[in-house]
Image (cartoon, rainbow, N blue to C red):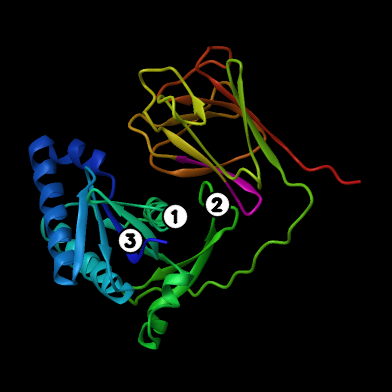
Amino acid sequence: MGDTLTVLFADVCDSTSLYETLGNQDAQRAIGASLLQIAAIVQDYQGRTIKMLGDGVLAVFESPADACQAATTMQRQLSEYFRAGGIRSGIKVGLNQGAVVCDGGDVFGDAVNVAARLGETAKIDQILTTKSTVSALDSSWAMLVRAVDRLYVKGRRQRVDVCELIWKQEGLTVAKFSAPPSTAQSPKLILRVGDMEVITERQQPTLTIGRDADNDLTVESDLASRHHARIEYRRSRFYLVDRSTNGTYIYLTPDSPVFVRWEEVILKGQGWLGLGEEVDADVPQAIRFHTRLPTHN
């Protein structure tokens, strides 16, 4: 079964832009100072830093309340640090309680995967957790939590109920949502590059695109990042989530591509993608896509 722990991922947002705007030395200094401050906060709240992840920290806590306290403290202190230094950045945090396997100083398991996915999904200055983690907190947290979404996690059949942990009170909108009705068929997004074809749909809601061979769709291009982007099926729509160095060009018409970088956009209709460069539709590295709507009898 493993140990029951609360897993926390905290990341400095858009570190690539920091290197571009601050220069290598100042950016490295700012990110390094941020990670040290995050690790110190983990220790203050009885947590344990497992490892540094380039521009982030993976930590575990015995108590979900301690993890939540640490997360809110991280946001407050790091926002003050960035603001005082005139740095346009922040952090995002994902945390989740569950059974983990501790091995060789690292942690593994479904709870870790869910926490990592929450960390990826969170926006700057945001803390995301799960409804199951919130249920382990006492009633004093009730006014600091709001439901925001239901999230697919790769390898999981059931979606995860996601909550936001509020660390600043102004400008809140309370979200109310319900699960979309199940249907026999769902729309599909079909992507092709060369002879390879992959499909995203309700039963396969996430796929990855990039240069590395471990992606669901591999593109051989020096301008594509190793893990360039994700396609996600959410609420009957298909989202391209770019996490690359050079961005993605989306062609719905040949002459006017839409450029996105570290953003998410809805894909619909048909067209093609260029990873890190503008491409014609017939070149080998172009990713053709089209949506197929469900048929009704």
Total marks drawn? 3
Q: CA distance from mark 1 to mark 2?
A: 9 Å
Q: Which mark is residue 7?
A: 3
Horizontally, residue 55 falls left or right of residue 5, namely left
Are the two marked residues, 3 and 2, in contact with CB atoms closer than 8 angstroms? no
Query: How far across and down, in percent of the image, does residue 104 sit?
Result: 24, 48
Residue type at numbered disc 1: Asp
From this viewpoint, which residue is outermost toward the top? 283
Q: Residues within 10 Å of mark 3 (few under 14, many from 20)?
A: many
Horizontally, residue 192 falls left or right of residue 182, namely left
What residue span does the magenta drawing correspond to? Answer: 233-241
Query: Which residue is nearer to you in this view: 200 or 243?
Result: 200
- Tag 2 residue: 156
Which residue is at 22% across, 51% downward?
A: 105
Residue 215 part of the magenta segment: no
Q: Residues within 10 Å of mark 1 (few under 14, many from 20)?
A: some
Are the two marked residues, 1 and 2, in contact with CB atoms closer than 8 angstroms? yes
The rendered magenta stretch, by its main secondary structure, is classed as: strand
Q: CA distance from mark 3 to mark 2?
A: 18 Å
- Tag 1 residue: 110
